[in-house]
Image: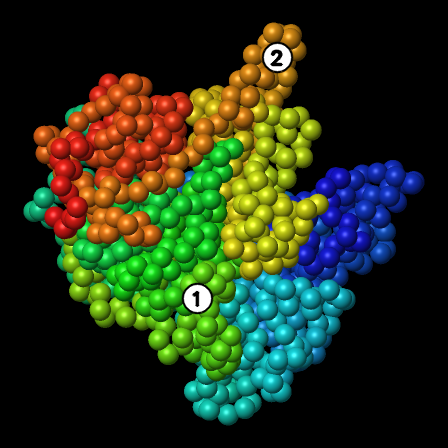
Amino acid sequence: MNDIVEPKSATLSTVFAAAISREDQWRHLNAYARAWADAAPGEAREKMRGKARELLATITRLEHCWAYPGARLLDGMRDALAGGEAKAFARLVQKVSGALLSGDFRRDEHAWESGADGEGRLLDTLPPDLEGGAQAKPYFEVLIVTPTDSSTWLRSNEELRRMHRPDDPFDYAPLHVGSFEDAALAVMVNPNIQSVVLIDGFQYASRHDLPDLKDFLSRNMHVDRDSVEPGKLATYLAGAIKDFRPELDLFLLSDRSPEHLAASDEAAPIRRVFHHLEEPMELHLAILDGIKDRYETPYFDNLKKYAMRPIGTFHALPIARGKSVFGSNWIRDMGTFYGTNILFAESSATTGGLDSLLEPTGNIKKMNEATARAFGAKRAYLGTNGTSTSNKIVVQAICKPGDIVVVDRNCHKSHHYGFVLTGAQPYYVEAFPLVQYSMYGAVPLRTIKKALLDCKAEGTLDRVKVIDMTNCTFDGHMYNPRRVMEECLGIKPDLVFLWDEAWFGFARFSPLHRTRTAMGAAAALTRRYRSEAYRKEYAAYKEKTANLDDKALLDTKLMPDPDKVRIRAYQTNSTHKSMSAFRQGSMMLVWDEDFHEVEGPFEEAFFAHTSTSPNLQLIASLDLARRQMELEGFALTMRMTQLALRIRETINNHPLISKYFHVATPADMIPAEFRESGITDYGPPHGSWADMIEAWRNDEFALDPTRITLVCGAAGFDGTQFKGMLSEKFDIQINKTSRNSILVQTNINNTHSDAALLIKALADVSRDIESRLAQEGKSGRDVFDARVKSLMKDVPDLPNFSRFHDGFRDNAKAKSNEGHMRPAFFMAYDEDNCEFVRLASDEVDKRLKEGPEMVSANFVIPYPPGFPIMVPGQVITGDTITYMRKLDVKEIHGYHAAQGLKLIKPSALSGRTHTSNQ
C-alpha cells in the first residue's frame, strides 16, 4: 500500500496522473475497506479506517468529474465511514471498484444503486466471439455545464434518462457541473465525456476546494480568466474544450438570440445552438446524432452488408465466399482458423457498395472525409501498402526533377527511393548523434536554417521545394513542428513540409502529443497568421531585423510575412503501427493551401503506387481505427503514456534491475541545448505532468515517453542478443535494437499485465546475472566487465554524410550539398560502370589516401541503426569505412561481404562535370 497517494501531496498535477489510474485508486480503497471491516476492534482497526478516510478524500477530490459512481453512492460511503459502519462502507466500495474495473456501470443500471452488491464481471475484456449474447450499447457521458443549483441536478438527470428510448443506438449518463473551471477539469480527466452541453449563465470559479485549479488550467489548457469578455464565457469555454479535445460535440443553450449567435465566429466550435431548454428531445437526438457521425464506418458498414448477401462470384478471386476453402480436402483448417466472415467479406469488386480506392465516389469518399475530420486535416488519402509507399506517393506528388529537398539523412529509405523516382535533389542534413547508443537523434533547427540560407547564398533558394523530416523518430525524438515551420517559412514563405509521422499517428488524439504534430502545427499557424495580433508582432520583427545579414539571421527567431506565407504540410502515418488497423494500413494527411497546384500530380502518384486490388479487410480496419480513435483515442493514448511512465520509473528505481538495465531519460537522449526547460526526466521525483507539458510546449526537441530506449549493454547483452532472449525465453516481442539497447514501445494495445511481464523478465535476468557472477568469481567478473565495456564504451563514431561526387552536382564549389542521386542510382544498372572492393582490403585504405575517390553505387543500410550510411553518388570517406569495419550486425542491406563495396568505376565518372536527370 506504500504507493497510495496521500491527500497532503495531492496537487492537481499529481492527481491528473492519478485520474488516469482511477481504477487502481479505487482498488486500493477497496483493500483498505476490507481490512477495516475484517479487523478486530482496536488501534489497528481505527488505523485502517483512517487510511480509508484519507484515500477516499483524495479520490473524491476529482470524482465530481465523472457521472459514476455519482452523488448517491459517494454520500452513502461518507455516511458509512462517518458512522463507523465498516461492512456497509466495504460493500459500497467493493461495488464501485468492481463496476469501474469491469465496466458494469456502462450496461447495468443496478451498478448505480446503493442496495445491490457485485464485484464486477470481466466480459468487457474478452473477445466478442467469446462473450455470447447481445452486445451492450456503447456508453458515454454528457457533460452539462449549468447555472442551476446543484440540488436540482439529480432530478434533471432522471428527466434526461426518461428521454432514452429502447431503439436509441447509444446509452449515456448526464454529468452536471456548475462552473467553467469544473467543466474544463472534467474534460481533461474524464475520457467518458463525448458531448458537452453549455447552458449560458454558469459561473467561472469552481465550487469545490481546489486552490491550485486556476494555475493548473492556465498551464495545461491555456485558460486565462482575464481575457474572457462579459457574456462570452460559454463560447470561450467551447473554444478551450475544442482545442484540448477537438473530437467532442459541443451544444449551446442560450437565451440570447440564437440566430445571431449561431452565425458568429465565436460559435464555430459549437455543433448546434438551441434557444435555452425549449426543445429537450431535440437536444437528446442531437447528442445521439453527433455520436453517430463519429461511430459510422461507411466502408466497414457496407462490407458487413455485402458479406451477408447471397452473391455468385465470377471474378478473379476464388477465395471470395470461401467455397474453395470450405469444400477443400486439404485446406479446410484455413476456414476453421479464419472463420466465415473474413472469406465472405473478400471480393475484388468495387460495386455493390464497396467503392473504388483509386476513384472513390461512395463510402470510401465518405471514409476519406471522416478521416480528414478526425485527424485535423483538409484532405486524407488511404494507403494499403504501408507508409513506405505513402512516402513515395507524397514525394512524387510534390517534387519534380531538379527540385531541392532538405532532408534528414537518417530518414526512412522510402524517402531516398522517392528522390530516385522523381529526380529531386536531396540536400542531406545531419541529426545530432547519440554515439553512446549508436543512434542519431533529430536535425537541429539551426542546421535546417543554415541549409536554406546556404541555398539562398548560392542563388538556388527558389529551387528548394520541400523540408522532409521524421517526426517522431524511431527512438522518440519529437520535433517542434510549429517552430520549425515558422522559422523556415521566414526564409522561404512557400515551402512544403513533409512530416513522416509513421510512428506518431496516435498523437492527434493525445492533447500532450498533438502540439508536436504536423496537422496540429498547420492549424495553429493558420490561425496565428490570420490574426491582427500577428500582423503587429510581424511589423515589430520586420523593423528589428531589417538590416541583419544571413549570419545574424541564423541565430534570430524568424517570422514569415503574413501576406506571403502559405501553409503547406503533408503528414504520413503508419496507422497499423499505433492504432487498431491491419498491417500495412497507412494514411496521407494534407493541409495545403495550394493543393490545387499539386492535386493532379498527387492523383497520378497515387495511381502509380496504389494497387488496383487493395485488401478490403485492410481498408475496413482503417475505417474502424478512425472510429475508435475519435471515440476513445483520448483515453487510450493517455493510458499508454501513463503506462510508459510507470515502466520507466519502475526500471530506473528498482534496486536490482537498475544495476544492469536503464531506461534512457530525456537528458540521456536530448542534448541540453535543445532542452531549454532543463527537464531531465519524467515523473516524480523529477517532475510532474505539468512540467512535462511545459517542456513539450517550448523545447526544441522532446522525448516521447512511450518510446522506451532500454539500455541492456550493462547486462552484457547487445540489442540483437537481448531481443532474441526476450522472444525465446519470455514471449516478449521487440522491434528495434541498437548496439547496446532495445526499443520498448507502449501503444494502445498494452496493459498493466504486459508491463508486469516485461518487469518480471528484467528482474529474472538480473537475478540470473547476479547468481552467475557470484559463482564464476573474479575471472567471470573480468570477462563480464570486458563485455560491458565493449558494448558501452568502445562504440564506433557515427559517420556523417560526406558529399555527392562532383559529377553529380551542378556546382561542385557551392556551400550547399544537394546532388543528383537518380543518375548515380541508374548508372549501377550497367555492370560495366561498377566495381567491387573488399571492405578489409588494402585497396580501400590506399584509395582513401591517394585516390581515386570511392563513390557508392547503391544504398547501404545496416540494421541497426537502419539508415543509409551510403547513398548512390556519395563519396565514401574514412569515417564511413571505419564505422563499417566496426559494425557487428548481421543485416546490412546493399552490402555483401563476399563481394565487397559496390562502387561506380572512376572511368565511368571521368569527365562527368555536370549531370542531367536521366
Q: Which mark is residue 781?
A: 2
Q: Secondary structure at mark 1?
A: loop
Q: Earlier in the sequence, mark 1 or mark 2?
A: 1
Q: If the image is split into quadrants, where does the N terminus sit?
A: top right
Q: Would you say residue 569 is visible in this rendering? A: yes
Q: Quadrant of residue 354?
A: bottom left
User: What amino acid does circle 1 point to?
Assistant: Asp
Nearer to me, 860 or 41: 860
Q: Position of residue 909 (x, y in %)?
A: 16, 37
Q: CA distance from mark 1 to mark 2?
A: 59 Å
Res. 122 mark = none
- For residue 857, side relative to residue 109 (left or right): left
Residue 296 location in percent, x, y? 35, 62
- Judged from the image, the secondary structure of the residue bearing numbered disc 2 is helix
In this rendering, the answer to whether 134 lies above or below 836 is below
Instruction: Give the labeled residue for mark 1.
Output: 549
Amino acid marked by disc 2 = Arg
- The answer to which of 779 and 235 lies nearer the viewer is 779
Question: Circles 1 and 2: CB distance less than 8 Å?
Answer: no
Above or below, 635 against 557 in this view is above
Relative height, residue 378 to residue 458 (above, below): below
Q: Residue lying at the far front in this picture: please name it.
A: 850
Q: Residue 191's spot in the image, x, y percent?
A: 55, 59
